[in-house]
Image (cartoon, grey):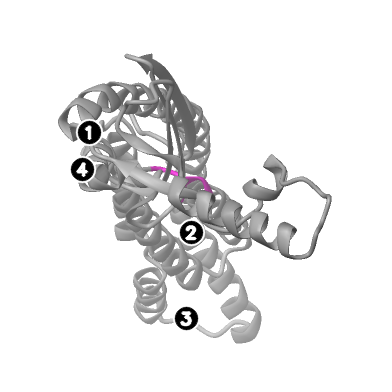
Amino acid sequence: MIKSMTGYGRAESVVSGRKYTVEVKSLNHRYLEIALRLPTVLSPLEIEIRKRIGGRFARGRIDANIKFESENKNDGGVGYELNVPLVRNYYALLDRLRNELNLEERITLNMMAAFRDAFVFTEQSFDMSVIWEELKDVLDGAIAALMEMREKEGEALYKDLIVRMELIANYVDDVASRAPQVVQEYQRRLHERIREIAGGVVIDDVRLSQEIVIMAERSDITEEIIRLKSHISQFHGLLKSNDAVGRNIDFLIQEMNREINTIGSKSSDAEISRKVVDIKSELARVREQVQNIE
């Protein structure tokens, strides 16, 4: 069954005091594009994360946002520490300034905390293999949720496209049944017109038949009808595929448009022309929907 390229998935888990939150969403895209937002501590795992996501999808823009929090102060990760030597130096200088100027104001904690570099950013080392083992299960959960939504969207697309393609097939049948009548009507009109012009003059039936044959050959749409029906059959087959068939279906729609345009150019019949417009209108709607198929 076809899958949509739009969807959203989320999963989170707390393991050994470490909280992982993964959100993934996907949108239409011609190819597969993966955009990641990771905390610095998880940067070494970027390649593994991309491989994990890329192995599950064939098309679409995948945006993944991964958050990491640790409740354990001794755990590997990122944080801040107090720069004690610098703070002591700041305090000594302030105390000296206070004495030099004979100031009564006390040195407070707020003063000390406001100084630049009083707190320094630190990155502690930890076992990335452990982090990956914990993270990948959460990542898989978010991916599974995204895939489930894409499948549900695909089911809705499938139902809509089936209805539209059946309507197109009915229009094609109408055109096919109308085509022989067009030749017969042309033959009748040609006979009537010649009789009006010729009066009582004898008409060369052989020459008249040749003109009718030439007209029938020029307006023959049998091949286009056969190819259109074949394309419709292929379309149904692709809709049932579990593979990424969006681009194949899009190409098939282009071929169907080419055939129906040829039919429109060959036929001068008003009724067939109306059906051609109806088919092209439905194909435009189908192609719009197809842009969302993986």
What residue is shown with label 2? 184
x, y percent for residue 76 = 29, 32
What residue is shown with label 3? 203
Task: Look at the numbered disc 2 and give the secondary structure of its residue.
Answer: helix
Q: Mark 4, residues whose alpha carbon is within 10 Å: few (<14), some, or many (≥20)?
A: few
Mark 1–mark 2 distance (CA, rounded to whole Å): 85 Å
Q: Quadrant of residue 58?
A: top left
Mark 4 in CB contact with mark 3 (< 8 angstroms): no
Bounds of the magenta segment: 288-293
What residue is shown with label 1? 126
Name which residue type carries label 1: Phe
Q: Nearer the viewer, mark 1 or mark 4?
A: 1
Mark 3–mark 1 distance (CA, rounded to whole Å): 101 Å
Counting residues from the N terminus, which is met first, the one under dot 1 or under dot 2?
A: 1
What residue is shown with label 4? 51
Name which residue type carries label 4: Lys
Counting residues from the N terminus, which is met first, the one under dot 3 or under dot 1?
A: 1
Please identify the quadrant where the N terminus is shown.
top left
Mark 4 in CB contact with mark 2 (< 8 angstroms): no
Does 81 appear in magenta? no
Name which residue type carries label 3: Ile
> Which of 241 and 279 lies nearest the eye of the viewer?
241
